Amino acid sequence: MGKNSKLVIIKLGGSVITNKDKPVSPNRRNIRLICRELSRAMLSDSKLRLILIHGGGSFGHYYAKKFKLGTNMTSSASPEGLARTAAAMIDLHSILLGELCRAGVYCGTILPIELFSGADNFSISLGGKNRVTSIFRNGLVPITFGYVTLIGNQASIISGDKIALALVRAFSVEKTVFVMDVDGVFPSSDLKGPVLEQLFPAQHAIQSSIKQYDVTGGIKAKISTGFGLAKLGTDVYFVNGTKSGRLFKILQGSDDVVATRIYSTKRGRFRSPK
Ligand SMILES: Nc1ncnc2c1ncn2[C@@H]1O[C@H](COP(=O)(O)OP(=O)(O)OP(=O)(O)O)[C@@H](O)[C@H]1O
Ligand SMILES: [Mg+2]
């Protein structure tokens, strides 16, 4: 990564890239729209460096839920469940890679296992950092995804959101963008009314409704991860990826977008809503 480059992490939520209520169903329309936005953003700003992460939606979450896998490590996970969840994630990943290539966004895959040392899923290992750097140095966009994770005799699911947190601990990240199928964070679980423009620590307890297949904590976990990210020095955005232009604008640095933000306090910036 060059000295002047701007590093942005984009988590493509399973809620937007799949039809979350229909098992194993990609949302090609949304995937193509997002791929075009990424391509436009990269073409219009040569300093922009992206790291992509995607979630599981109705691929990974479906099998994880079916086989009762979760984010807590366990030694009694079903081998069939682990294998089917992993296979579904790789299927979704492959669909995404195809569409990214079609849009001219050429990516290098990193399995989560390559990012961590094998002892925990908390911090990116030196090998993981080198892998990210080497992908950039070959002109590619690093991409990884929520997946099954094995440590010793234990297994669990690691969410894409948590991978974002680990990456922000390891790199200097300007922004982290969570792309979802809704306009941002709503104050209540009926998803009605305008979204909150900005979240403050007191709003940790947003009401949420959990979608049918979700084993990694849905919006609640995402918000608490968002506060963790902001503390580390990155601005956080929750944006609707089904609406043309929004992700692009955020990547361009415009703040005039319907979205929810958590501004980093670490950089000494404290902005009030418009
Ligand atoms: N108060 C709320 N504000 C915004 N979204 C909410 C709220 N309550 C529930 N949701 C739901 O949370 C979803 C986003 O979280 P979820 O974990 O389901 O998606 P994701 O992270 O995009 O998917 P994945 O975990 O597969 O990557 C939205 O699709 C929305 O339906
Ligand atoms: Mg999620």
Image (cartoon, rainbow, N blue to C red):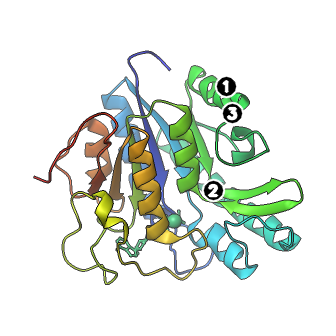
Residue at 53% x, 55% y is: 161
Q: Position of residue 265 (x, y in %)?
A: 31, 42
**Which residue lies under the disc numbered 2?**
146
CB contact under 8 Å: marks 3 and 1 = yes
Q: Considering only vertical position in the picture, is 70 above or below 36?
A: below
Say which element carries label 1. Answer: helix
Farthest-out residue, front: 202
Q: Considering only vertical position in the picture, is 209 above or below 76?
A: below
The answer to whether 238 appears left or right of 123 in the picture is left
Q: Marks 2/3: CA distance? A: 15 Å
- Say what amino acid the circle numbered 3 marks: Gly
Q: Position of residue 101 (x, y in %)?
A: 54, 41
For label 2, the crowd category at 10 Å Cα-Cα, with few meaning under 14, some 14 to 19 and many 20 or more, is: many
For label 3, the crowd category at 10 Å Cα-Cα, with few meaning under 14, some 14 to 19 and many 20 or more, is: many
Residue at 56% x, 59% y is: 55
**Which residue lies under the disc numbered 3?**
128
Q: Nearer the viewer, residue 50 or 73?
A: 73
Q: Marks 1/2: CA distance? A: 20 Å
Res 130 → quadrant: top right
Say which element carries label 3. Answer: helix
Q: Position of residue 23 (x, y in %)?
A: 61, 78
**Which residue lies under the disc numbered 1?**
130
Q: Nearer the viewer, residue 139 or 198?
A: 198
Precedes in sequence: disc 1 or disc 2: 1
Q: Marks 3/1: CA distance? A: 5 Å
Q: Nearer the viewer, residue 68 or 134?
A: 68
Residue at 27% x, 52% y is: 246
- Say what amino acid the circle numbered 2 marks: Gly
Ligand 1 position by quadrant: bottom left
Question: Mark 2 CB in 8 Å range of ligand 1?
Answer: yes
Question: Mark 1 CB in 8 Å range of ligand 1?
Answer: no
The answer to whether 9 appears left or right of 236 in the picture is right
